[in-house]
Amino acid sequence: QQPVQSPQAVILREGEDAVINCSSSKALYSVHWYRQKHGEAPVFLMILLKGGEQKGHEKISASFNEKKQQSSLYLTASQLSYSGTYFCGTESSGGYQKVTFGIGTKLQVIP
Amino acid sequence: DAGVIQSPRHEVTEMGQEVTLRCKPISGHDYLFWYRQTMMRGLELLIYFNNNVPIDDSGMPEDRFSAKMPNASFSTLKIQPSEPRDSAVYFCASSLSDIKFFGPGTRLTVL
């Protein structure tokens, strides 16, 4: 079952902050975040593992609440280059491979 | 080092025709994934392989869809017969650990 992302779309001015939320109805082992720019392939941003370990981007942070089966992606001091569609992917078995992605959150940063 | 290679990049075909999409994963990666992207459903996992063996094909929508991985450097996704609702962007991705590297995608249009 796909995770649910919110908001579905957001427009920011450069320098503003944004939060993208992801929730699942299933117990989660890991949460994966990817960004896709228009017409391009999705690119890995971050992975958050059960137990608190996280790996990923320098300027983008995220949280993972295992009990609530939720994750949030924090974009601070947004730049024009942050524009794109952000996908949350969830995985429940611990093998990291069978990742189910949400529909995505379209983020546009304007000058 | 070349990334994931997909061909063709664009495919336009008529309903009822057979369509074959091709993928060359990154050398050394032992997992290969096929995803389908649509506006309504986002990124859907269709099937994935480990060491050329199909592990989970529960996302393949119908028997019209089939995928093979005859060796570590090549995979195909075949749709026979194709239908207009199969129109989407099909991504191939490969991984060695928990980070997926996506190819540029094949945009399929079935008329």
Image (tube, coloured by chain):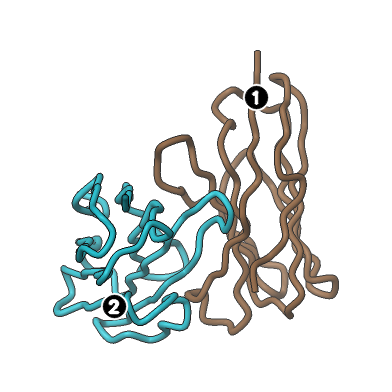
Q: Are marks 1 and 2 on the same chain?
A: no
Instruction: Please report, as a chain letter, where disc 2 is located.
Output: B
Residue tagged 1: A109
Residue type at mark 2: give it: Ser
Chain A, which colour?
A: brown
What numbered label is drawn on residue B66?
2
In this view, the residue in front, B14 or B95, is B14
List the single residue furthest toward the right: A68
Q: Residue at x 76, y 45 (%)?
A: A7
Residue B53: x percent and y percent? 28, 86
In what quadrant of the picture does the C terminus of chain A appear? top right
Residue type at mark 1: give it: Val
* Label 2 secondary element: strand
- What chain is the cyan one? B
* Label 1 secondary element: strand
* In the rendered image, the vertical position of residue A75 relative to residue B62, given as above or below: above
Q: Residue at x 58, y 62 (%)?
A: A101
Q: Is residue B101 left or right of residue B17?
A: right
> Pointer 1: residues within 10 angstroms few (<14), some, or many (20+)?
some
Residue A8: x percent and y percent? 71, 45
